[in-house]
Image (cartoon, rainbow, N blue to C red):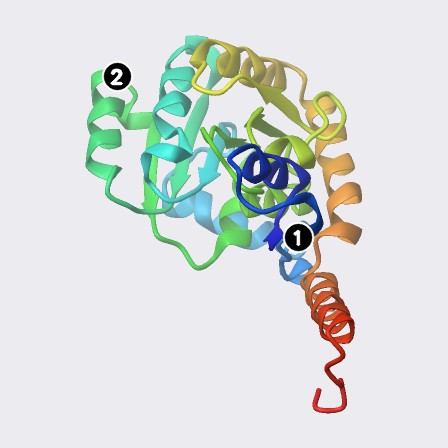
């Protein structure tokens, strides 16, 4: 059994799924070369122009499926609590069955002009480049690939302290963790990142330093191959067919 993080493994064991000896932990890998902050700068500016976001504005955003477990309701409610003078936009990239309900909530909260639903996007590095702060408000998450991608782009990250996210983010070191489903705590974290951009840049730089060597696609493939080879050897199955 392969878990993406130690926390995910622990949750499975607590539910009676498998035994300690049956589990291996191998994080999901991403194409790290696609997430180069410098290379994506112009593409990020193009995304901001696409949605008429002023150069002076700050962009708080996420990349996610629009489903309840992603906690996007709490991102919108946190965004509504920011100071009126924050000059911030909320950019949500992704699609899913909750889109209509989230758009309605944005209108009810008086946020509609400053909340952008970008829909499904293939240009994730460009979308991340357009953001100043990345948010992962999930209620559960095996790991959080979007967090890794945002960290590789040196974005300061605010995320829920749930499941595997806690293995990615050390709060105050390479991002900020907040309680799940708590828009007040999330708003406080976002307000601090907006008020202290230099600190946010430090968090983003540390995130890239942490994620770059650990979450590459090549490392994931090597680890999975080594795991299978070990299992085959333990069962006396020859490897010459590989």
Task: Specify few, some or many for label 2: CA neighbours under 10 Å numbering under 14, 14-19, or 20 or more.
Answer: few
Task: Indicate left or right for 201 with 107 as reference.
Answer: right
Q: Quadrant of residue 192?
A: top right
Name which of mark 2 and mark 1 comes first in the sequence: 1
Write down the residue under mark 1: 22
Front residue of this view, candidates 17 and 136: 17
Q: Residue at x 69, y 61 (%)?
A: 220
Count of numbered tags: 2
Task: Indicate left or right for 41 with 236 as reference.
Answer: left
- Vertical placement of residue 239 versus 188, above or below: below
Can I make out residue 186 in this image?
yes
Residue 7 location in percent, x, y?
Answer: 63, 35
Task: Specify few, some or many for label 1: CA neighbours under 10 Å numbering under 14, 14-19, or 20 or more.
Answer: few
Task: Indicate left or right for 53 with 151 as reference.
Answer: left
Q: Quadrant of residue 159?
A: top right
Circle 1 — which element? Answer: helix
- Vertical placement of residue 191 versus 207, above or below: above
Write down the residue under mark 2: 110
Circle 2 — which element? Answer: loop
- Vertical placement of residue 44 versus 178, above or below: below
Are the residues tagged 2 and 1 within 8 Å (C-beta)? no
- Looking at the image, is mark 2 or mark 1 nearer the viewer? 1
């Amino acid at each position: 059994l392969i878990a993406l993080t130690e926390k995910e493994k622990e949750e499975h064991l607590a539910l009676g799924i498998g035994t300690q000896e049956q589990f291996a932990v191998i994080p999901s890998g991403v194409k790290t070369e696609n997430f180069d902050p410098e290379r994506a700068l112009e593409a990020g500016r193009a995304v901001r122009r696409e949605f008429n976001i002023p150069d002076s504005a700050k962009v708080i955003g996420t990349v996610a499926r629009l489903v309840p477990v992603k906690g996007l309701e709490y991102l919108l409610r946190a965004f509504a609590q920011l100071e009126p003078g924050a000059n911030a936009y909320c950019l949500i990239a992704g699609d899913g069955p909750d889109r209509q309900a989230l758009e309605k909530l944005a209108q009810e909260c008086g946020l509609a002009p400053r909340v952008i639903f970008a829909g499904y996007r293939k240009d994730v590095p460009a979308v991340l480049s357009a953001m100043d702060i990345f948010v992962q408000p999930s209620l559960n998450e095996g790991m959080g690939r979007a967090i890794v991608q945002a960290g590789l782009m040196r974005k300061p990250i605010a995320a829920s302290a749930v499941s595997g996210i806690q293995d990615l983010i050390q709060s105050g070191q390479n991002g900020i963790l907040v309680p799940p489903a708590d828009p007040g705590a999330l708003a406080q974290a976002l307000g601090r990142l907006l008020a202290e951009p230099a600190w946010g840049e430090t968090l983003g730089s540390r995130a890239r330093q942490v994620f770059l060597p650990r979450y590459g696609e090549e490392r994931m493939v090597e680890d999975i191959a080594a795991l299978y080879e070990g299992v085959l050897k333990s069962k006396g199955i020859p490897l010459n067919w590989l």
